[in-house]
Image: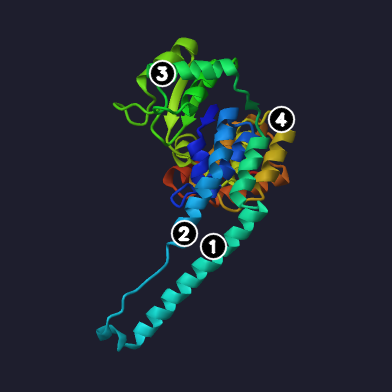
Amino acid sequence: MKVFIDTNILLDIYHLSGPDLEELRKLKKMVEKGKVELLVSMQVIDEFWRNRERVIADAMRKFRESKASAQIPNIIRIYPEAKELKEAVDKVNEVVKQLAAKARVDIEADTLKSDEVIREIFSAIKVGAVSPSLIEQAQLRSKVGNPPGKKDSLGDAINWEWLLEQEIEFWDDELIIISADGDYESELSKGKPKEYLLREWNEKNTSCELKLEKSLADFFKAKFPDIQLAEEIDKIEAIERLEESGSFAATHRAVSTLDDYDDFKDSEVKRIIKAYLDNNQIRRILEDEDVREFALKVVGLAKSEETIGLSKSLKELLEPL
């Protein structure tokens, strides 16, 4: 799966209404695990660092302005709770002041958690160069009015031309563009790329579907619905290894990893039980202590009617052992 992430998505992490930092952590983990191939041009990198300061300054200004207040008329002041209300308002404003000061220290020391995760993402990928000829193509695209992009802005046009010229293997794959500003989105079919972009893409990449997501949250909901936290990616990967296990050693490794977890969703329990039932490599070593004990642990976690039914089948295999 190939993903192009627009600069606005990265900058959103600093906004008051932006995505949780955990979404970026999940993306980083997916890139490291090879689940996602992130395509990033130098245009995205430059645009990010060019706008980062402005976005942070705006976010800090809005936060400092988010002071609590309470207009307490005379008819209310006579109640004891009025004093408590004023103290609560003062406390909120003091906490806002303290948090702003802490953030200022991290900003000046270049130690913001958001920056740390973004740098890790950038260091984990190969950034694509933008040639002078590509910029000329983007200028022509903008002049004739072809999408994507706004008038007098070349950023999106440069990124699109860069994507079109990529000589990478798109066969039987998909390219997902994650962008929130609407420059790639169809005006008729919301949530889908503009028809012009689809036509242009399909002419060059006949077997690679072009898709659009408007946020990291939407992307993970569509492609990895079971993953809520970055730490869960290792668990999902271990479940996949168990399902696909082709040797006794691989089974033991997957079981060892999974046994460290105590919390499993019902959908995960279902997958694990089905792996035990369907994978002959696992069934042949059911009497091995670690494989058997983990099976008993998972059977006890079944909640839904379907999973409980599957767990009964696994119990029948375990009982003679």
- Tell which circle, 4 or 2, labels the residue nearer the N-terminal end: 2
Asked if the residues shown at circle 1 and circle 2 are in contact, with their CB atoms under 8 angstroms apart, the answer is yes
Name the front one of labels 1 and 3.
Answer: 3
Q: Please give left or right for residue 295 compared with residue 8 in the image.
A: right
The answer for how far apart the CA atoms under marks 1 and 3 are is 44 Å
Identify which residue is drawn at 46% across, 70% down: 93
- Tell which circle, 2 or 3, labels the residue nearer the N-terminal end: 2
Q: Which residue is mark 1?
A: 100
Q: Quadrant of residue 170?
A: top right
Identify which residue is drawn at 43% across, 29% down: 212
Q: Amino acid at mark 4?
A: Ser
Q: Secondary structure at mark 2?
A: helix
Asked if the residues shown at circle 1 and circle 3 are in contact, with their CB atoms under 8 angstroms apart, the answer is no
Relative to residue 99, is residue 90 depicted above or below?
below
Q: Give the color scheme: rainbow, by chain, secondary structure or one colour.
A: rainbow
The answer for how far apart the CA atoms under marks 4 and 3 are is 59 Å
- Which of the image's four quarters has the C terminus? top right
Q: Secondary structure at mark 4?
A: loop
The answer for how far apart the CA atoms under marks 4 and 1 are is 55 Å
Identify which residue is drawn at 43% across, 50% down: 17
Badge number at residue 143: 3
Give residue 11's position: percent from left, percent from top: 51, 42
**168, 111: nearer the viewer:** 111
Q: Please give left or right for residue 70 compared with residue 111 in the image.
A: left
The answer for how far apart the CA atoms under marks 4 and 2 are is 55 Å
Identify which residue is drawn at 36% across, 19% down: 195
Give residue 28's position: percent from left, percent from top: 61, 39
Name the front one of labels 4 and 3.
Answer: 3
